[in-house]
Image: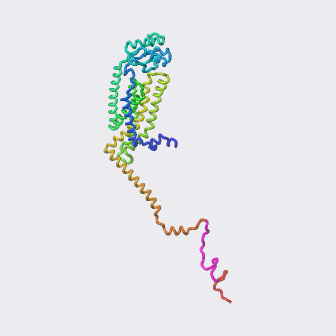
């Protein structure tokens, strides 16, 4: 029972762990600004690695029975070189189908004559019938349609989120939440641009999916903030920032557990399904979900609530309340310091009581015999002038 009370989750809920997230908001804003700058520079300089659905290209499917995927990719590359035009293999993955597994190889844009020549060369290289090789051509116009529809869906989603958060909380919370959602999108897209992950329609779907997860994380934290700050101006114990920081501590373990539980199946989808089993169709969706969910946890904790506190501190009612709380804390701190100083001064400058000093001086030393009352003028307490028990007034003969 004692161990449970002293655990990290319990100390976080009571505000005893000392995690000052809101107090360091300038640091988080600076880090967020630097990351956004890096992402924007990557967008401008590196761009994105677009799949053939967006950039246009050709795809060829070869039966998996011809050999390994590395061998297939190498021979298809040779066939593209013989066809001319500078085309090359962009991606290669193993896919399943009604006729069995096959390798799907996506290449740069080819003309119809070049595509037929490459198909014939692939069949000759592997010694199979040309009918066993299927080829498709994808126009970049289809990718632009997907992009425009995804942007339309994003705008509708953000509008609905704003309306919900304004009705559920307030407009400042809506602004802070939507800002964290945009931050989540920019950082995830920046990782894709920097690392060179391929952007496919599955990636776009994944982007829209992680927005819902990020919104859930923010709502969990904001719900606790609203609970802690309800009627906060009626007392002078906490500023709005203190109450919001306590809400972050109280909901931190819940958000962390939710994120870990959500990342486990996505990680299995990505690392086991796409990595070990070679299910390439799962890679695009699993990758964006894994990256986006991890970033969503950080933005909901380190960005959304500190931004909310910054907005609330501009409200006159909260400003007046914060001043009262800070003045009360300063008065208590100065009174406590004065009390400690007064206690030390009283102990050092206290007057000495003469009677107490006399009693202290008359007190016997440890181990000394008690002093008896001694009659003056006689040895051994005998009366002067007489000896023994004789009366001092006896007549002389």
Which segment did they paint magenta?
Answer: 367-385
Q: Nearer the viewer, residue 229 or 306?
A: 306
Q: Main secondary structure of the magenta part?
A: loop
Residue 221 quadrant: top left
Residue found 34% across the figure and 41% down from its top: 312
Residue 383 position in % (x across, y down): 63, 80
Quarter of the C terminus within the rendering: bottom right
Farthest residue to the left: give it.
316
Which residue lies at the image location 32% right of the left edge and 29% below the top edge?
155
Residues 298 and 382: in front is 298
* Residue 71 percent across, percent down from the top left: 49, 17
The residue depicted at 45 percent of the width and 22 percent of the height is 280
Q: In the image, is residue 370 part of the stretch drawn in magenta?
A: yes
Q: Nearer the viewer, residue 30 or 310?
A: 30
The total number of labels drawn is 0
Residue 327 lies in the magenta-colored region: no
- Considering every residue shown, the one lying at the far right of the view is 397
Residue 101 pos. (x, y %): 47, 16
On screen, residue 120 above or below 43? above
Q: Position of residue 240 (x, y in %)?
A: 37, 44
Q: What colouring style does the render use?
A: rainbow
- Left or right: where 375 falls relative to 235: right
């Amino acid at each position: 029972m004692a161990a449970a009370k002293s655990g990290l989750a319990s100390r976080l809920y009571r505000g005893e762990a000392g995690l000052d997230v809101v107090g360091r908001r300038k640091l988080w804003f600076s880090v967020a600004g630097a990351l956004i700058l890096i992402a924007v520079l990557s967008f401008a300089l590196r761009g994105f690695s677009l799949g053939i659905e967006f950039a246009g290209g050709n795809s060829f499917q070869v039966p998996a029975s011809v050999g390994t995927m590395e061998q297939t990719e190498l021979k298809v590359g040779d066939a593209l070189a013989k066809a001319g035009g500078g085309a090359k293999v962009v991606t290669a993955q193993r896919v399943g189908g009604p006729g069995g597994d096959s390798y799907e190889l996506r290449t740069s844009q080819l003309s119809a004559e070049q595509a037929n020549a490459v198909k014939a060369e692939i069949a000759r290289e592997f010694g199979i019938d040309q009918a066993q090789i299927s080829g498709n051509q994808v126009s970049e116009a289809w990718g632009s349609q997907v992009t425009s529809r995804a942007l339309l869906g994003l705008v509708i989603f953000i509008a609905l989120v704003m309306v919900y958060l304004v009705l559920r909380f307030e407009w400042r919370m809506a602004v802070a939440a939507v800002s964290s959602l945009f931050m989540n999108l920019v950082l995830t897209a920046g990782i894709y641009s920097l690392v060179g992950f391929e952007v496919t329609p599955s990636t776009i779907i994944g982007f829209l999916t992680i927005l819902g997860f990020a919104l859930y994380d923010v709502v969990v934290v904001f719900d606790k903030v609203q609970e802690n700050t309800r009627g906060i101006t009626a007392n002078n114990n906490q500023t709005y920032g203190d109450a919001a920081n306590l809400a972050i501590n109280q909901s931190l373990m819940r958000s962390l557990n939710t994120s870990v539980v959500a990342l486990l199946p996505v990680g299995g989808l990505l690392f086991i399904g796409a990595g070990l089993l070679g299910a390439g169709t799962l890679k695009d969706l699993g990758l964006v979900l894994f990256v986006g969910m991890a970033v969503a946890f950080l933005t909901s904790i380190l960005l959304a609530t500190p931004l909310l506190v910054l907005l609330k501190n501009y409200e006159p009612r909260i400003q007046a309340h914060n001043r009262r709380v800070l003045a009360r804390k300063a008065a208590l701190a100065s009174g406590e310091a004065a009390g400690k100083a007064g206690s030390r001064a009283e102990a050092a400058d206290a007057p000495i009581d003469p009677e107490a000093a006399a009693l202290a001086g008359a007190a016997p030393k440890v181990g000394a015999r008690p002093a008896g009352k001694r009659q003056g003028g006689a040895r051994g307490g005998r009366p002067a002038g007489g000896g023994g028990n004789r009366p001092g007034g006896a007549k002389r003969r």
